[in-house]
Amino acid sequence: MERGLLWLPLLLFFLWLAWSGWNEYRKVEAYQLWAESFDQAKYDIYAVLGQKGSDLTWGIPTRKGPVNLESFSLRDIETIRLLVNGQPASWETPPERGRAVLEFACIDRDQPIGIPFTEPPLAAKWAQHLQRELDLLKTRQESGEG
């Protein structure tokens, strides 16, 4: 009887671990269905992000698909910054660890839009990619193409 009681916490831990794995698997499956309609997309435990042309959509991943979705256009962005643990960081040499946020300062909003990332190097790659897209859009607008 005592041995059974000693093994019970371990059994409960393994049950919780299995449930957590299944829960995360379901989130990834829902994300993959959602991401099919985008040119570029990213998933992590904090947020999902999708890009279709100059439009960005982001939200919180759940088992039933992303929720609290917000969309905005790169056309409305003034600047893109990478913050790691609340401090500005370089895109070229981001820290390996820390809680990263891509911050978008919008022309028509008082508050910037912050999209969380678990890995600063991945956030830096997205920042560089989106900055290239933003520069291309501005060049097209200035030349009258866009």
Image (cartoon, rainbow, N blue to C red):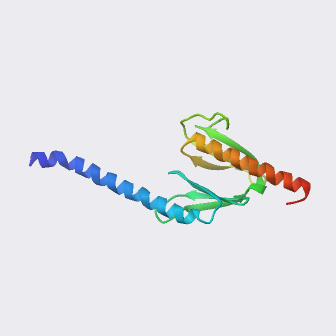
Question: In the picture shown, does residue 17 fall above or below 71?
Answer: above
Image coords of residue 77 (percent x, y)? 76, 52
Residue positioned 64% across, 49% down in the render = 114
Question: In the picture shown, does residue 89 fall above or below 64?
Answer: above
Residue positioned 74% across, 47% down in the render = 131
Based on the displayed image, in which of its 4 quarters is residue 23 positioned? bottom left
Based on the displayed image, in which of its 4 quarters is residue 52 positioned? bottom right
The residue closer to the viewer here, 133 or 84, is 133
Image coords of residue 135 (percent x, y)? 79, 48
In the image: residue 115, left or right of residue 109: left
In the image: residue 11, left or right of residue 28: left
The residue closer to the viewer here, 6 or 146, is 146
Question: In the picture shown, does residue 64 fall above or below 127?
Answer: below
Total number of numbered discs in the rendering: 0
Seen as rendered, the residue at the extreme right is: 143
Residue positioned 75% across, 48% down in the render = 132
Image coords of residue 1 (percent x, y)? 8, 49
Image coords of residue 16 (percent x, y)? 32, 53
Quadrant in which the C terminus appears = bottom right
Residue positioned 54% across, 37% down in the render = 98
